[in-house]
Image (cartoon, rainbow, N blue to C red):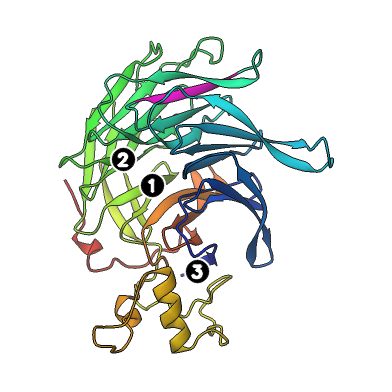
């Protein structure tokens, strides 16, 4: 199987990441109130600019590929849209923020641009989703809120390809599909399996977590006719609303908290198990194909930067003493009681990611034909995976079953 590209972006968690259209630049939140813009130079990512406007941790980032605008959402209850413009003093092109009037009284948790990039949705802890569109008269972004029947924090959202329907997963153990139709912004969408008349805040579907877990992530299939969501009860559910039919894939491993569709019949999910897993299926059923990660050997041979290809490790900083210090600093790993041998070997995972994967996104290929995906996680790594490189199932994943 082809080796993934592995980049050690930081020694701190990556809360969220997003690429520009040609994948030469990357926006990341390193669990702070600032977003970093990095550029791809050789086998590394180099910071070139910092977006500083938020007061608290940035929880989510999205980069619109066509309009080249970045939107950030934060625990400070604000969102900003960033556009490149010339600096009046230096003439240099810089990122300028535009205020978004969210009107929420709790943290913003997740944000995504719509397919046409004329609006975006911000999930929040205020039991509401702010659907934002631009007001040219006042030069700011204004929000209409989806509220009923949400009963708890909204953890994720995803747009339907028609630019009107919006899926949301929340901590009230529900995945829902709403109409986010805004008059004078959207054209009336054609009828679909989700309904025909779609005024704002129409609930087109509501689905419960199988065993009462938070719904961490939701995603429409490339056609928009199927919905998938992951729950904290270690399940992935695939919904066909025409039936309606719901397939539930149960796992004995740790919960998945993020997912993406790579084709109409393929989903990649990742989370606390630290490895991306490929699922395949259709209207007749779903099954787990395998992991994109080779979990047969520890990944300590990966150098501190650049790509992994099974090459020899970097020698200058590969001593046992340095590894012990680095593990204590970055992952809180120390020595055994009584001053014994370091515990690094005992806690080295056989996965590329050494901690929870927080975000998975399409990296290469058209919608419905994605060939590579990118993941980032609490270990500060960014990894680019080949979708077709699937290894066998680990012992925990072998216990997956469809209910």
Give above or below for 44 relative to 226: below
Does residue 161 sit above or below 297 in this rendering? above
Q: What range of the chain is rendered magenta?
A: 128-134
To which quarter of the image does residue 127 belong? top left
The residue that appears at 40% across and 32% down in the rendered structure is 123
Magenta-colored segment: predominant secondary structure: strand
| Alpha carbon distance from label 1 to label 3 | 21 Å
Q: Which residue position holds label 3?
A: 2
Residue 356 visible somewhere in the drawing: yes
Q: Is residue 367 visible?
A: no
Q: State left or right for residue 189 relative to residue 195.
A: right
Image quadrant in which the C terminus is located: top left
Q: Which residue corresponds to mark 2? A: 229
Label 2 crowd (10 A; few <14 / some 14-19 / many >=20): many
Q: Image point 35% across, 80% down: which residue? A: 344
Asked if the residue at tag 3 contacts the one at tag 1, i.e. Cβ–Cβ closer than 8 Å, the answer is: no
> Residue 179's spot in the image, x, y percent?
39, 19
- The mark that comes first in sequence, 1 or 3, is 3
Q: Which residue is mark 1?
A: 259
Residue drawn at point x = 45 percent, y = 30 percent: 122
- Which is closer to the viewer, label 1 or label 3? 1
Based on the picture, tell me whether residue 130 belongs to the magenta stretch: yes
* Residue 57, position as x, y percentages in the image: 47, 45
Query: Which quadrant of the view contains residue 145?
Result: top left
Residue 163 belongs to magenta span: no
Question: Tag count in the figure?
Answer: 3
Mark 2 against mark 3, which lies toward the viewer? 2
Instruction: Determine the secondary structure under disc 2.
Output: strand
Sequence order check, earlier mark of 1 and 2: 2
């Amino acid at each position: 199987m082809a080796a993934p590209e592995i980049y050690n972006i930081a020694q701190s968690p990556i809360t969220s990441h997003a690429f520009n259209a040609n994948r030469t630049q990357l926006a990341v939140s390193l669990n702070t109130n600032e977003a970093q813009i990095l550029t791809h130079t050789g086998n590394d990512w180099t910071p070139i600019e910092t977006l500083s406007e938020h007061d608290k941790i940035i929880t989510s980032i999205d980069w619109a590929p066509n309009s080249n605008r970045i939107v950030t959402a934060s625990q400070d209850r604000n969102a900003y849209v960033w556009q490149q413009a010339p600096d009046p003093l230096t003439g240099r092109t810089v990122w300028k923020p535009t205020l978004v009037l969210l009107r929420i009284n709790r943290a913003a948790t997740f944000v995504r641009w719509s397919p046409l990039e004329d609006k975006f949705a911000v999930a929040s802890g205020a039991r509401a989703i702010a659907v934002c569109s631009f007001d040219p008269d006042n030069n700011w972004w204004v929000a209409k809120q989806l509220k009923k029947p949400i009963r708890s924090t909204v953890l994720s959202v995803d747009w339907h390809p028609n630019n009107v329907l919006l899926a949301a997963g929340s901590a009230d153990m529900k995945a829902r599909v709403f109409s986010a139709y805004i008059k004078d912004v959207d054209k009336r969408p054609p009828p679909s399996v989700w309904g025909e008349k779609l005024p704002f805040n129409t609930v087109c579907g509501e689905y419960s977590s199988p065993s009462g877990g938070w719904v961490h992530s939701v995603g429409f299939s490339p056609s928009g006719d199927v919905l998938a969501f992951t729950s904290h009860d270690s399940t992935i559910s695939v919904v066909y609303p025409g039936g309606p039919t719901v397939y539930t894939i149960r796992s004995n491993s740790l919960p998945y908290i993020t997912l993406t569709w790579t084709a109409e019949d393929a989903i990649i999910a990742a989370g606390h198990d630290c490895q991306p897993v490929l699922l395949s299926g259709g209207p007749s059923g779903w099954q787990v194909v395998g992991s994109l990660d080779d979990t047969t050997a520890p990944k300590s041979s990966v150098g501190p930067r650049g790509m992994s290809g099974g090459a020899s490790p970097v020698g200058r900083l590969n001593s046992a003493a340095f590894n012990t210090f680095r593990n204590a600093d970055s992952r809180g790993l120390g020595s055994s009681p009584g001053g014994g041998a370091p515990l690094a070997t005992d806690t080295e995972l056989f996965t590329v990611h050494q901690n929870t994967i927080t975000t998975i996104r399409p990296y290469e290929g058209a919608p419905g034909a994605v060939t590579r995906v990118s993941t980032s996680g609490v270990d500060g790594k960014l990894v680019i995976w080949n979708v077709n490189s699937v290894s066998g199932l680990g012992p925990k994943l072998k216990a997956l079953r469809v209910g």
